[in-house]
Amino acid sequence: MGIRQIEIQLIASIVAVAASLPGNFLILRKMSMMSDAISHSILPGIVIGFFIAGSISSPILAIGAALTGVLTVWLVEVLNKSKLINEDASIGIVFPALFSIGVILITKFAGNVHLDTDAVLLGELAFAPFDRIIINGIDIGPKSLIMMSVILLVNLIFIFIFYKELKISTFDPSLAESMGFKPEVMHYALMTVVSITAVGSFEAVGSILLVALMIAIPATSYLLTDELSKMILLSSLIGIITAISGYWSAHLLDVSISGSMASMAGIIFFIVLFLSPKHGILTMLKRRKNLKLEFAKMALTIHLQNHEEEEESSINHLYDHFSWNEKFADKVIKNSIKDSLIKIENNMIFLTEKGITFADKSLKALRIENFK
């Protein structure tokens, strides 16, 4: 493995971690689409910054992008607060409008500059190691690596200092306001961080991969834990795995690196979606199946307790009474016997002492639930 390959994976990993940090809060605030809007709508800010500075490496581009990102959030909220349209529609209006303005500005006034829309959308990760910072003849390293390292450091410092404020304003804005945390200030500070991360990632990975790293990765970690601190750590780890596995997939298949990484982010998300031990689809199906069985056991024991007639305790009668198919009824009976809730004598079902206690508790729980 050559030094350029290591640098590409390092750049992608740092971008993934830097993007996933604010992305966690976007997921928790149900603002995933806002990252897509910001990652596209900051384009006019970059172009205007270029017009002012005359160079694509000027920090004025980042400032312009950050301001446009905040403008995007403000415009979306103004439209949303008007109650005339919802937030999704507001994003759908603001983001294409600003992005198209950026595309028109590039096409009209910056056609001969290396600031094309393809680079903005798809990035140039394969070429990132060749754009290097050299000071006094000393090679400092790839520009994207240094720039994204600085942005990662800024994001880490921001979250470390304002972790408590971000956490409370994310889960309970009213409580945050009563504690004097000013949730609106935190909201716009977070959006500024998202905008700066987006503009820093543009040249290296493009806006498409940025959205995947900023949303798909935190969404994946969200399926694995309910704790914010663990979610942040997991998203960083998943981001690094996504970057490295995506690079080697692209290398083996000879395809786009950014496209491969975005695909890996999606593949990892769907694997976790199915297999997550806490919130995965398979876990939910198993939980639903167990709940159905548990409810059937409750119904069976309550029925036996309330009907002591011989006919009501017959196994064949229970099939008809509960409209259970034979397979499910056998499963309920076997499971109840295993839990020592019932016993069978002469094809009749009787409650055990444990079954009577279980039926009493079940009935009491149902009455309390109905009372609520």
Image: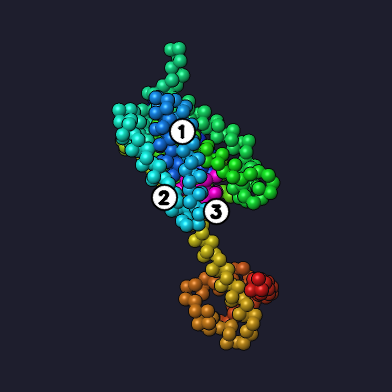
- Where's residue 204, x and y in %? 40, 32
Screen quadrant of the C terminus: bottom right
Name the element at disc 2. Answer: helix
- Reading the chain from its start, which is encountered first: label 1 or label 3? 1
Residue identifier under label 2: 92
Q: Position of residue 142 (x, y in %)?
A: 43, 24
Left/right placement of residue 167 relative to residue 7 reads right
Residue 361 magenta-highlighted: no
**N-term mark: 1 or 2:** 1
The magenta region covers 25-34
Q: Nearer the viewer, residue 97 or 171?
A: 97
What's the mark number on residue 171? Answer: none
- Kind of element beneath mark 3: loop
For disc 1, the marked residue is 64
Residue at position x 42%, y 27% in the image: 52
- Let me know if residue 41 appears in the view: yes
Q: Nearer the viewer, residue 234 or 357?
A: 234
Which residue lies under the disc numbered 3? 278
At a point 42% along the width and 41% down the height, the residue shown is 41
Which element carries disc 1, helix, strand or loop?
helix
**In the rendered structure, are the residues bearing label 1 and label 2 in contact, judged by CB atoms less than 8 Å apart?**
no
Residue 216 in picture, x, y percent from top left: 46, 45
Rendered position, 199 above or below 72: above
Question: Disc 2 marks which amino acid?
Answer: Gly
Compute the Cα span from label 2 to label 3. 33 Å
Residue 32 part of the magenta-drawn span: yes
Q: Residues within 10 Å of mark 3 (few under 14, many from 20)?
A: some
Q: Nearer the viewer, residue 225 or 174?
A: 174
Q: Main secondary structure of the magenta part?
A: helix
